[in-house]
Amino acid sequence: GAVVSQHPSRVICKSGTSVKIECRSLDFQATTMFWYRQFPKKSLMLMATSNEGSKATYEQGVEKDKFLINHASLTLSTLTVTSAHPEDSSFYICSARGPWEGETQYFGPGTRLLVL
Amino acid sequence: GQNIDQPTEMTATEGAIVQINCTYQTSGFNGLFWYQQHAGEAPTFLSYNVLDGLEEKGRFSSFLSRSKGYSYLLLKELQMKDSASYLCAVMDSNYQLIWGAGTKLIIKP
């Protein structure tokens, strides 16, 4: 299957700082990338969908000014958590998909964020 | 509304067979996915069904009945490393993935 990387895998930051998470598709062109958040023992929660070269589409209840998403190329999307607070601590996972809407999503390894 | 149902937790014995069921009610259907997720890790793709029937892939098989809104994941010759959560997800008419809550599978020696 396709390979998706995510960096960093783990980050600890102080409250009020911003954190950037990168998601890269290593061996295919990802027209669409997805950002998920997962709380312990809970299912995935879709935060936003980003298409290369256009603005991300955010799910209801997700603050777009707090979770900035940039999908500047077919292999890279970034999620920036701005002015992080302890309640933003979570497991953030990206996934990538090729140009066909019915294609499988392949997941990155996830980023564990802890805000102190 | 859209709904995916799967059991919360199942227990099975090493070497045995287990079937994890998933029922769904969604706005349209463009395929059903099964993912495996080990604790603390991201999901990994297991299977995709869009037509009725059984798809076999090694020790894992996935079945779909679109008329019944039903799928199952069958795991044979269970190994301890199969202990994980198994997520069922359906792609709706807008090509959005609707996720089940996952089934935690516990394998006992």
Image (cartoon, rainbow, N blue to C red):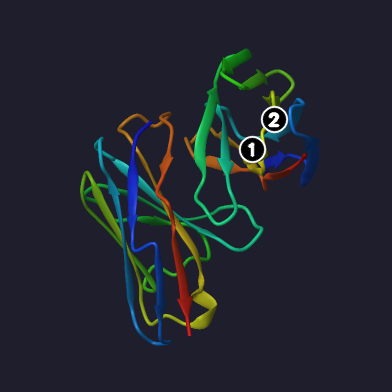
Would you call the spot at circle 1 few (<14 residues within 10 Å), some (14-19), or many (20 or more)?
some
For residue B6, side relative to residue A52 (left or right):
right
Would you call the spot at circle 2 few (<14 residues within 10 Å), some (14-19), or many (20 or more)?
many
Q: Residue A17 at what x, y percent from top left? A: 35, 84
CB atoms of marks 2 and 1 within 8 Å = yes
Name the residue carrying label 1: B82
* Above/below status of B59 relative to B42: above
Which of the two residues, A51 or A1, is positioned nearer the viewer here? A1
Mark 2 on the same chain as mark 1: yes
Residue reaching furthest to the top: B53
* Above/below status of B46 relative to A81: above
Residue reaching furthest to the front: B109
* Circle 1: residue type: Asp
* Above/below status of B63 relative to A31: above
Chain ID at mark 1: B
* Above/below status of B62 relative to A80: above
Mark 2 falls on what kind of element?
Answer: loop
Q: Residue B35 at what x, y percent from top left? A: 56, 37
Q: Residue A10 at what x, y percent from top left? A: 41, 67
Name the residue carrying label 2: B78
Let me know if residue A47 appears in the view: yes
Please tell me in which quadrant of the rendered image residue B87 appears: top right
Q: Residue B14 carries which label?
A: none
* Circle 2: residue type: Leu
Which of the two residues, B82 or A107, is positioned nearer the viewer here? B82
Mark 1 falls on what kind of element?
Answer: helix
- If the image is split into quadrants, where does the N terminus of chain A sit? top left
Q: Image point 77% across, 47% down: which residue?
A: B8
Q: Image point 62% across, 53% down: which residue?
A: A43
Q: Image point 23% across, 45% down: which residue?
A: A75
Chain ID at mark 2: B
